[in-house]
């Protein structure tokens, strides 16, 4: 029997990972989404099981605030959690839940649960689960001057998503303990990318932010207990690796559906506003 993706209770409904209103707006129902195992599936078929409470009382209000552009950063982060974990870990989470029928939301069972932190974070979508800081990841918003074509990019390592809903886009890193939101260099880049912005500049920021996380190794102390996760101290920088241009090129090509795309220098980027001819 299906268990609720958020709380682990009995599921009685199903929720579209990419919400109905967004699929209707951009005609996504029969378009195909590539999954991490390189298979594809129609957007309209990608769902997660939920109990009625988590669907109607937890996620529905968040979806409404996302749709009306009144969402808080915590709302946006929780919405990103649903999309990210729904796409990448749905089957892992549900298989583990079925093997532990007495499991309750927020229990710490590290020996039996290799995705313990991820599971805790997925539970934090529920209002009964708290994180400190809140949100527990970094959230960046992009407002466009006109409607943009839908796009969704989802990364597994240093997990994050980049998604566009039309005239607004979001870059969210799932579990960096809001590190990027505290980095002056990333805030400066973000402000620069918000000027005359478009989907390409949002993706550029996403790629550079991911590279920042990949290059910088931090020591982070996290405490998990029933119904909460807490960052105990400011992350301590351990080491910094040089910028890897080949890795950035590979990441950028992946964002462009595998097409080899030339990386601009700074002068070209500013002259063209980041739009390749």
Image (spheres, grey):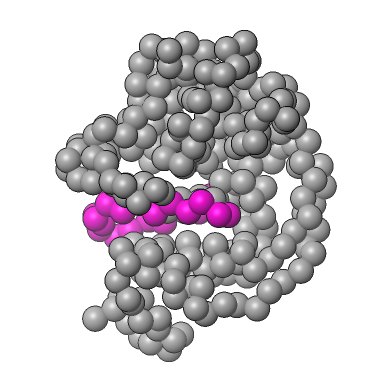
Numbered range of the magenta stretch: 139-158
Camera sees residue 237: yes
| Residue 45, percent from left and from top | 26, 32
Q: Is residue 43 above or below residue 246?
A: above
Q: Is residue 232 above or below residue 51?
A: below
- The answer to whether residue 197 is left or right of residue 101 is left
- The answer to whether residue 151 is left or right of residue 125 is left
Q: Residue at x 45, y 31 (%)?
A: 91
Looking at the rendered structure, the number of numbered marks drawn on it comes to: 0
Magenta stretch contains residue 192: no
Q: Is residue 259 above or below residue 17?
A: below
- The answer to whether residue 66 is left or right of residue 121 is left
| Residue 77, percent from left and from top | 52, 41
Camera sees residue 164: no
Q: Residue at x 62, y 56 (%)?
A: 181
| Residue 24, percent from left and from top | 20, 37
174 vs 254, nearest the viewer: 254
- The answer to whether residue 45 is left or right of residue 206 is left
91 vs 105, nearest the viewer: 91
């Amino acid at each position: 029997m299906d268990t609720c993706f958020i709380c682990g209770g009995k599921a009685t409904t199903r929720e579209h990972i990419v919400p109905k209103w967004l699929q209707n707006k951009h005609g996504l129902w029969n378009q195909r989404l590539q999954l991490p195992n390189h298979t594809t599936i129609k957007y309209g078929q990608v769902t997660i099981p939920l109990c009625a409470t988590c669907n109607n009382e937890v996620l529905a209000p968040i979806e409404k605030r996302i749709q009306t552009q009144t969402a808080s950063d915590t709302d946006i982060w929780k919405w990103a959690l649903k999309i990210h974990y729904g796409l990448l870990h749905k089957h892992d989470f549900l298989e583990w839940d079925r093997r532990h029928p007495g499991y309750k939301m927020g229990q710490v069972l590290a020996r039996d649960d290799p995705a313990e932190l991820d599971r805790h974070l997925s539970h934090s979508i529920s209002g009964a689960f708290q994180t400190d800081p809140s949100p527990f990841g970094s959230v960046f918003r992009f407002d466009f001057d006109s409607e943009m074509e839908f796009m969704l990019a989802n990364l597994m390592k240093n997990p994050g998503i980049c998604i566009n809903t039309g005239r607004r886009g979001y870059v969210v890193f799932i579990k960096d303990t809001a590190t990027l939101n505290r980095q002056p260099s990333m805030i400066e880049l973000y402000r620069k990318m918000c000027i005359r912005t478009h989907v390409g500049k949002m993706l550029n920021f996403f790629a550079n932010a991911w590279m920042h996380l990949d290059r910088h190794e931090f020591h982070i102390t996290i405490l998990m207990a029933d119904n909460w996760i807490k960052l105990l101290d400011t992350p301590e920088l351990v080491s910094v690796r040089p910028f890897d241009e080949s890795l950035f090129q590979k990441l950028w090509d992946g964002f462009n559906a595998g097409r080899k795309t030339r990386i601009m220098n700074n002068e070209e980027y500013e002259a063209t506003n980041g739009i390749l001819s």
